[in-house]
Image (spheres, helix red, strand yellow):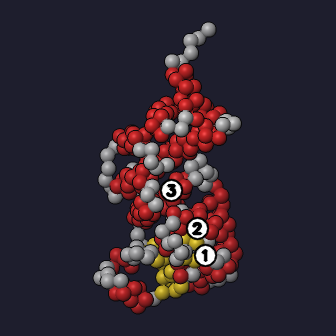
Amino acid sequence: MPSQAPWKPRLRALIDLLKDDSPRVLAQVRGELLRLGKRSHHALRKAARSGAPATRSRARQLLLERARSRAVRRLIKYAALETHDLERGLLLLESLRSPGSDPAPTVRTLDAHGDAVVERMRGQAPGLERAQKLVEYLAEERGISGAPEDYHHPDNIFLGQALVRRRGMPLTLCALYALVARRAGLSAGLLPFPGHVLLRLSDGGERVIVDPFAGGRVLNEIHCLSYLADHGFPYRSEWFQPATDTAMLRRHVLNLINSLRSRRRFADARALEVVHALLMGKGGSVPTIVRSLSGSRERDGSDS
């Protein structure tokens, strides 16, 4: 009969200690279970169905932490690539909110919106009237607009939540509009204005700037220049040119970092700071970064 793996009795003892109410004991147990990695997964899943409320709750929390760590590692590996796709990056970012969730519903919703816009553009000649159909559909029919209340809440940053709630920050809504526009065959670029991203739609050689946060309001150059002057910003030509997907993903990550910091979720913010650095073209090797983050989470039990 094969001998039992030496770590299994210790694993059983650690699971049993999840019901302990001592913060010091729980911190040690948490660190040990996280270090065991996949070897503790089955035991934690079983403990998550325990009849003991404390054991069940703490096991579920550890499983959630592990899923979130996996989501962070995937995002880090993606950020380390040379080029990025905004949609792919936002779906990976979404997994930080609901670790283990399926991105398919978000993609299907974007596809459905794209199909709806195509239907409304049917028979329209190329030009701004086609772009206007996109704005009318998303802003008027779907009621998608800005979320001035609790502006920096994470739900205003995640793409999937913006689709469900029909509310979001300027960058999130511009990304939503752009992803639907691209599905409908329109050219869409995000203009990186400071503090308030705008969207440029192009079709048939014509262009228009819209503000999805303001319910799809059409802007001209005077509006844009007045915004800059009112907020004390000098004119910069690059703000009137679409930014790269990498630049917009980086800005999206920075929005989420600031939101997490304001809610004292410092460990999650630190993980995203690594992603931001990689998107800036900085940072060390991915394996080293992942190992350092794992160690940081084991030491820091104050944030989950």
Q: Amino acid at mark 1?
A: Ile
Q: Which residue is mark 2?
A: 162
- The one of 270 and 54 positioned closer to us in this rendering: 54
Look at the numbered disc 2 and give the secondary structure of its residue. helix
Distance from disc 3 to disc 2, alpha carbons, whole Å, reads 13 Å
Look at the numbered disc 3 and give the secondary structure of its residue. helix
- The one of 25 and 118 positioned closer to us in this rendering: 25
Q: Tell me which corner region of the image, top left, top right, bottom left or bottom right, holds residue 118.
A: bottom right
Q: Residues within 10 Å of mark 2 (few under 14, many from 20)?
A: many
Circle on res. 38: none
Q: Is residue 282 above or below residue 110?
A: above
Work out which quarter of the rendered image holds the N terminus and state it.
Answer: top right
Q: Is residue 299 above or below residue 243?
A: above
Q: Residues within 10 Å of mark 1 (few under 14, many from 20)?
A: many
Q: Tell me which corner region of the image, top left, top right, bottom left or bottom right, holds residue 136.
A: bottom right
Q: Are marks 1 and 2 in contact (CB under 8 Å)?
A: yes
Which residue appears farthest toward the top when viewing the image?
Answer: 1
Going 46% across and 77% down the picture, which residue do you hit? 198
Q: Which residue is mark 3?
A: 93
Q: Amino acid at mark 2?
A: Ala
The image position of residue 72, as x and y in percent, is 47, 48
Q: Amino acid at mark 3?
A: Leu
The image position of residue 227, as x and y in percent, is 40, 85
Query: Is residue 178 visible in this depiction of the protein?
Result: no
The image position of residue 157, as x and y in percent, is 51, 65
Distance from disc 1 to disc 2, alpha carbons, whole Å, reads 8 Å
- The one of 29 and 21 positioned closer to us in this rendering: 21
Query: Is residue 125 visible in this depiction of the protein?
Result: yes
The image position of residue 43, as x and y in percent, is 60, 31
Q: Is residue 236 above or below residue 12?
A: below
Q: Which residue is mark 1?
A: 144
